[in-house]
Amino acid sequence: MPFDVEAIRADFPILERTTPDGRPLVYLDSANTSQKPRCVVEAIEDHYLSHNANVARAMHLLGAEATEAFESSRAVIAEFVGAASSEEIVFTKNASEALNLCAHTVGAALRPGDEIVVSVMEHHSNIVPWQLLAERTGATLRWFDVTDEGRLDVEGGLAAGLINERTKVVSITYVSNVLGTVNPVAQVAAAAHAYGATVVVDASQAVPQMPVDVQTLGADLVAFTGHKMVGPTGIGVLWGRYDLLAALPPFLGGGEMIETVRMTGSTFAPPPHRFEAGTPPIAQAVGLAAAARYLSALGMDQVAAHEHLITAYALDGLATVPGLTVLGPATAVDRGGALSFTLVNRDGEQIHPHDVSQLLDSRGVAVRGGHHCARPLHERFGVQSSTRASSYLYTKTSEIDALVDALTYVVGFFSRPPRGR
C-alpha cells in the first residue's frame, strides 16, 4: 500500500490523544515500545472472544482453531524474516528470554578457556546472560569496543585477535538501541565462522525498522521481540538454523516440549516445540502475525526509507539546539531511528536526562531518559545517562519540530538569565 503517514496514523488511535492541557501527544519512544494499530488489537480481541482454547491439547473445535491460529502465526513470522521453514521459529515471551535460551543451550558445552565475544554497545539482555554463562562454565567474556563516532570497532577487534580459535560464541546487536548504529553483522559472522563459532544476533531494533532476511544475514540464531514491531507485549521470537536447533538441548522443562516422559528419564520433541515448555503466548502470537502482515502490506523497504528520512531530519534539527551532543553517528548513513543525546545549559552545566524528559513531557513530547539498559556503553562515552528520542513509521516531521522546539525551551528553562548591566 502507499506509504501515507497520515493514513497510517489513523490506524493508531492512541496517537489522537492529547495531554491534559490540550497539547497533541508526540510519541518519540518507539525504540522502547511501539504503538499498536487497530488491526493488531482486533486480532487479539477476536481470538479471545471467538477461538480461545489451549493449543495441541484439546480434541475439540476451539482447540483445533487455536492450534491452527498459533501455528499459522508461526508460518507468517517465518515468511516475514525469510526463514527456511516455520520449524525454525521459536516463540518466547520476549527477546530477553530468547537470548537467555541461546546462552543456556549453546553455552551448555562451554568449558574453562573457551571465549564468548559481545560488544560494549549491547543491551543488558545481550550482556548479562553471557556473563552468567561465563560464571557457570569458567569461560571468558570479551568484547568489541566502539569508535568515538559510535561505530562498532570491527577492524580493531579483529586485528587484536578478539575472535580466535578459543571463541565459541559471538553475540552482537544488529542495530544499537542507544546509538542507532547498524552493525556489519555479515562481516563479524564471517570472522566468527572461520573459527567455528556460533553467531547470535539481537535484532530487536532491526526487525521493526528494515527488511531482515535471516538466511542471508550470516547469523546462526536471531532474537527479536513483538512489542517493538507494532505487535503485542509478551511475545518474542528466536529464529535458528534448524540443524542447530535440533542439536541443542532444551531450555525449560514442562508440557509440550517432550516426546516421552518416564520416571527414569525423558525424550524431547523436535524444534521448535522443544523450546516452548508450557502454555505458549497464543493470543500474542496471533497479534504478532497481524503486526507482521500489517508491516508487510506497508512494505519494509518503505518503512526503512521513512525511518531514514525522519532520522536525517531529526539529526539536522537537533544540531540547532544549543548545548546538545548526539551520541553515535552524526549522519543517517547506516543508522537506525534511536537518537540519544546529552544536553547542557548556557553555562555548560549538564541537564539531567530525567529533568529533560519530565519537562518535555509537560509539553506533550514523550521520550526516554536513563541508560536505556546499556550502562557500559554510556560509561564508554563518559556519561551517566542520556535522553533518547526514537521515531517509527507513524512519526511526522512536525513532531520532530515539536521536539526541537521543546528542547530549546528546556535549555532556556535550566539556564540562568543573562546579567543586566
Image (tube, grey):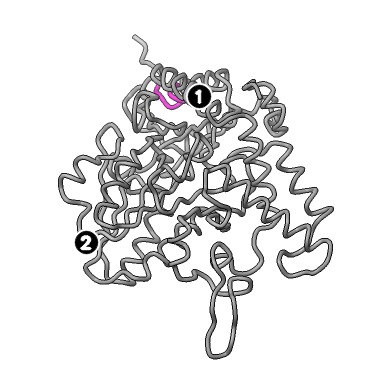
The residue drawn where x is 45% and y is 34% is 338
Instruction: Give coordinates of residue 262: x percent, y percent.
Output: 59, 87
Residue occupied by mark 1:
305
The residue drawn where x is 45% and y is 45% is 215
Secondary structure under tag 1 reads helix
In-image side of 272 versus 374 (left or right) = right
Looking at the picture, tell me which residue is in the foreground, 366 or 6. 6
Secondary structure under tag 2 reads loop
Q: Give amino acid for label 1.
A: Ala
> From the image, which quarter does the N terminus lie in?
top right
The residue drawn where x is 54% and y is 64% is 271
Residue at the far left: name it. Answer: 160
Looking at the picture, tell me which residue is in the foreground, 326 or 411. 326
Which of the 4 image quarters holds residue 136? bottom left
Q: CA distance from mark 1 to mark 2?
A: 40 Å
Residue occupied by mark 2:
166
Q: Which residues are magenta?
A: 409-416
